[in-house]
Image (cartoon, rainbow, N blue to C red):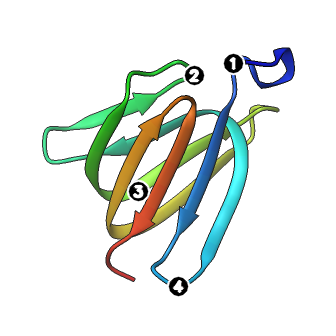
């Protein structure tokens, strides 16, 4: 991994037909049926159905909240892909 990518997540949120957001960040917080969880750099590979609000913390510390009813989240190698299931 290059030094400029260390400690960063690449985050993409999309529907079935279009990309809604592509950014880098420090963390993603979300909730599934078990409860709230956080995704940080170097997180283990992970797949979950997430419900409701997600919060993305950008590299500068800015916070972005995004709300969808249900989404599929996949995390692998510091890449967070979210597919909105209910628009």
> Which mark's residue is nearer the viewer, 2 or 3?
2
Mark carried by residue 41: 2
Q: Residues within 10 Å of mark 4 (few under 14, many from 20)?
A: few
Q: Tell me the element at label 1.
A: loop
Q: Tell me the element at label 4.
A: loop
- Determine which residue is flagged by label 3: 53
Q: Tell me the element at label 2.
A: loop
CB under 8 Å between discs 2 and 3: no
With 36 as the anchor, is 33 left or right in this view?
left
Per the model, the C-alpha gap separating discs 1 and 4 is 30 Å
N-terminal-most mark, 2 or 3: 2
CB under 8 Å between discs 2 and 1: yes
> Which mark's residue is nearer the viewer, 1 or 4?
4
- Determine which residue is flagged by label 4: 17
Between residue 70 and residue 35, name the one nearer to us: 70
Per the model, the C-alpha gap separating discs 2 and 1 is 5 Å
The residue shown at (59%, 44%) is 56
Per the model, the C-alpha gap separating discs 3 and 1 is 23 Å
Reply above or below: 59 against 19.
Answer: above
């Amino acid at each position: 991994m290059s030094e400029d990518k260390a400690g960063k997540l690449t985050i993409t949120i999309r529907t079935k037909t279009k990309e809604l957001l592509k950014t880098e960040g420090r963390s993603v917080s979300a909730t599934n049926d078990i409860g709230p969880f956080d995704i940080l750099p170097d997180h283990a590979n992970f797949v979950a159905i997430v419900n409701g609000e997600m919060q993305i913390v950008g590299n500068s510390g800015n916070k972005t909240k995004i709300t969808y009813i249900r989404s599929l989240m996949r995390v692998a190698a510091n890449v967070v892909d979210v597919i909105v299931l209910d628009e």
